[in-house]
Amino acid sequence: MRRREFLKLLLGAPLMAGGLPVTAWAVPGVPERLLVHLMCVGGADFRFLFAPHPSDTAYAARFWEARSALYNYNRVNYADYAQAFADNYLAVTDGSPFGFGIHKAAPWLKAQFDAGNVAIVSNVLASELRRHDQAQLVMASGDLAASQYDYDRDGWGGRLMETMPEANVVAVTDTVSIFCNGTNPAHRHARLVHMRDSRNFALSTGSAGIWQERMARSLKSYYAAKQIQSATMPTAWPYHKILQNEMVLRRFGDGVRAVTDAYPLPDAVTALTANAKPLAKQWANIYDGYSAADLLKPRAVSMEYGGWDTHRAQRIFLETSFDALFGSDGGFAAFSSAVAPDALANTTFVVTTEFGRQLHANGDAGTDHGTGNYQILIGPAVAGGIYGEMFPRREINNSTGPAPYDTHGSDIKGLTSFERVCAAACDWVRPGSGVAVFPRTAYNDLGQFPEGPPLEPGVDLSRLFT
Amino acid sequence: MGIWMKNVLLALVMLLQVVACDGGHDRGAGNVPPKDPAPKTESDPPPGILWTEAAVRKVLHLFAYGGQASDAQIKSWAALAPEVAIAQMLTFDEVNPLLSPVVDATGAQGGTLEQLQTHWSSSDAENATREDLRSRFAVLATNPNTNLKSLSASALINTWVASTNKSGLNPFRQKVGLFLTNYLMAVSLYKVRPTLIRGMYDDVMSDLAAGEPMWNILARGATSAAVAMHYGHYTNTFDNNTLQFRGNDDFAREFHQLFFRDNGRDFPQEYHEEVTIENTARALTGMRIDRDASAWGGSDIANDYWLNLIEFSDHTDAMGTVLNNGTLHHAGDLEILGATISGATARDKIYALSGVAINVQESLDNLPVYMIGHFADDNLNAEKIQAIRTLWRELPQKDLLMFLRAYAISPMLHRSDTFKYYTAVDRNLLLFNLNTVDNEEAYENSWIPSSMLSLQGLTPFIPAHDVFGGQTSLDAVNNPDIFKLAYNAAVDNYWFVVKYQEKYTDSAGDHLWEKQWSRVMPPNAVGVYRVREIAEWLWQRFVADDLAHYGLLERAYVTAFLATGLDFGFVVNEVDPEHVFSETELSSEPYASYINAHEAAILNLDSNDTNTRYVTQRNIGLAVDFISMTPFMFATGGG
């Protein structure tokens, strides 16, 4: 029932945009279960995406007192909050006493939540260091103990691929995240297809002229010979990586070109570019990745969206970014309307960031680095709802000292390790893979195994997927 | 500490003392080699170091985009004791005449980015830049739609890129400058106006040239207008009456984490967060930046009025704005990193704090490893990391130049398991620089790889990772799309590398520039340019591996281009030009004869016939283009 509602919603989307796109769903590829990892780089303030309902007066008063400066309201009068909430948020009823709000710049997300396709996991923790590069490394590798000196290492997307006989991560980003790397130090990218520009994916054949042709022929035959030669080189030989880059482009180049030549991008996706939406290129790359699913065997996609380090005047940036992702004409809406329903049904998005931000607005209408945050899972397979205490009472009441909202520099306390959430997503892609990808999650009993990653009391992530 | 390292350090300290007595820290007009360079003796090289031409070239590739030193100079350095040679090779002066010989007036107006940008965009008679290319360096650009003038970001980028391939400057200085302003103390044109970034770059490089210790270099960056603008703390204030801080703590954290690589683990986390970070934020108050509407030649955009100037006292700027940088600074002492930090201004406090921060254990451990990882080694292990830390810790003044010099002649760099992948800037500027034979070409060939760098993910002064720096070498090598872009550029835009002539017109008339490889390429013992020797010379110039990776396959393709302008497969079999050859095949007939014949061919570099000359230059260009796309131009070292 719930899935049917979701698909119905999606079916309506192109019509709302003014008619069925010409090329929508006219593509052959339907990936198997696939995880799209969307990393919001910079430490996104998802506490700005979600807000307490004004009827939750005890919490909302403290929330407003600490954060009203973020909203361009001049007074810290609680009476303003009802108006601020009405101005900025869409009220959501989730079965809890008060409900909550999803920012108005994210109507698509709200509609999906209402349809039961969005799971919001609260109080998620990765690195406690509050340092961008280290926290991103932890989040991409899935390893809390990741060394700051080791950027040539495996990531959790790559490890997930290795649990399946034929599976690849498709990175649609400018830079390939460590998330995509496999465990073989001699070939980290054995399961990677980097589609930064799917419509210009292949190595040149030098068709533009005789000199180009001569160079293209030389390089093609030279590299083919070097690929054979390199088999005798030690695994630590540094030049393997360069040859591996050539090999993957050679292997998939012609096939991807054939698919993209045959299937133009649908209107909804090209509109993202026309409207200068952030991530337009990445959405187009993913679409083409789906079209070429038979060739690429994608079981994970790596996306990135930068600029979330909002120390100053964060409202404008966040509203623009929420709209780019979750607006009615944003990336999620466009992509969802463009791909076939059965392909979408096999897709789960994991929207994440390296750390959270502090509870209080700073003096520049922004927020400084914190630790805990929300993780958002989206897709028909997700059992929608709130996991964990969305607006914890401990933030306004503390029996042992000042409450976090009374303490400068305080943040969302991380209670659930991101490893738990990501392992659950892995299990959905490939049943039983979660422990292989995140070995610490084998210790799953609260308190009895302190070496295991934490899980907020009362939260059952085994229900995260239907 | 190993004996070799003590010897290296001792030698470098003594050498620096000699140079200091000889007129200062290798700077200015005194930038000449030591008067009595120590000849190489059997006991000179530290154990494990084979100080050869290849070793010299490796240092030049890693630290100076190859440099502009002549073959004779490279030979000369290889013949010297390494600690003497390295002191000549690596300096922070605006001009290093041995690394980049003075052949014209290029550095005569000074070698800062500001001086170069001003000079190259001027109509000065000494300016060798083509008239039609001067606008690419101009500080101000005019919007053709609005006719409004504003600061040009691309001009700053072009100036920096062009500064790396002009003889008479110092490419090592530019490489370190890029590291400091794009990685360690990263600022971005997305957030900061180009003149502020340029000012920060020139200021920190000036301090380095003056021999300032590393903590003062970092303090200079931390108190710059560029960093204050990037992180937004230029509006941070402290009310000394109400004790109210207003602002953000962004840079207060990054000062420790990024500049000094200190994550706060030497102290309890609560102390780091509540004392160190919070009080550093208070130290960074009173940093409003001056503005002047007439600055930079008169931009029409108000956002361009910012000056590279923070005056750390109450004053009124040129716009008539009162800036209370004294009053709104936290007046009292502050406890940071367990020390009492005093100072009347933000500048005083940050300089004092830097002197403490440089000696925090985490910084001592991490900063030197981060720097060597950036410049030279993607395969660090525990042993090498320990040696690097020891080298840094033992340096009393934390002198960056001394540190890099000592490392560059240490076994750590020259051992077989050390390798370094190239970033898009490293690889493209190596190619750009070494494919430029002289300043005539540097000024008259209109090709500049700025846009190619951007396409391949490394735009100077727009760090890819925003907060924590630009594209790393691992980012580059782990990115198949960058490989594809390089490959397709070598094929479809081969002309960028192969170009052998260019016509242009200026106020003096028509001009024709012609490539002149013979100006740097050595004839053999009998005075001719034979393909065999030229191919090896090219490989050594661009790859610099003592021909370690110049195998039969490489010989076949490189010499075919040199001798015929054709691809080897097509030469030997037009029907199957993409045939994949094994070395066994190539060493047997008929292929061996083809290779031998190609290698025996003579290049007519000095022919009086224009077409013959062009064909020869073109074929050399094709060979260079091919070499540039072998795996060995994407990394160096590693056996």
Image (spheres, coloured by chain):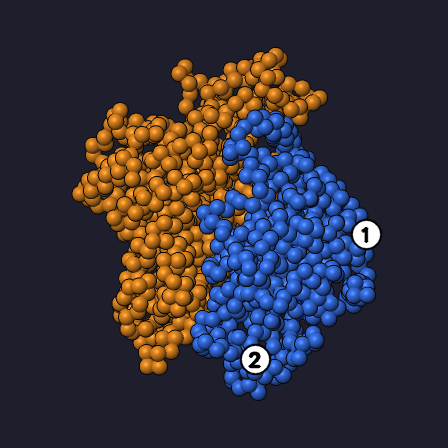
Chain colours: A blue, B orange
Snapshot quadrant of residue A206: top right
Q: Is A120 situated left or right of A453 in this image?
A: right
Query: If you read the primary sequence from the N terminus, does the residue marked by circle 2 or circle 1 appear first?
Result: 1
Determine contact: label 2, label 1, CB under 8 Å: no
Q: Nearer the viewer, residue B213 or B31?
A: B213
Give the chain of mark 1. Answer: A
Q: Nearer the viewer, residue B51 or B295?
A: B51
Query: Which residue shows up at 61% across the image and 21% down it?
Result: B582
Q: The N terminus of chain A appears in which quarter of the rendering?
A: bottom right
Query: Which residue in the protein does label 1 denote?
Result: A26
Snapshot quadrant of residue B70: top left
Say if residue B379 shows up in the picture: yes
Query: Which residue shows up at 65% across the image and 39% down it?
Result: A249
Residue most extreme to the left: B21
Give the chain of mark 2. Answer: A
Instruction: Tell me if residue A359 comes above or below residue A165 in the rendering.
Output: below
**Number of marks in the rendered image:** 2
| Image position, residue B539 (x, y; %) | 47, 27
Q: Residues within 10 Å of mark 2 (few under 14, many from 20)?
A: many
| Image position, residue A384 (x, y; %) | 71, 66
Residue type highlighted by circle 2: Tyr
| Image position, residue B406 (x, y; %) | 31, 39
Query: Which residue in the protein does label 2 denote?
Result: A59
Residue type highlighted by circle 1: Ala
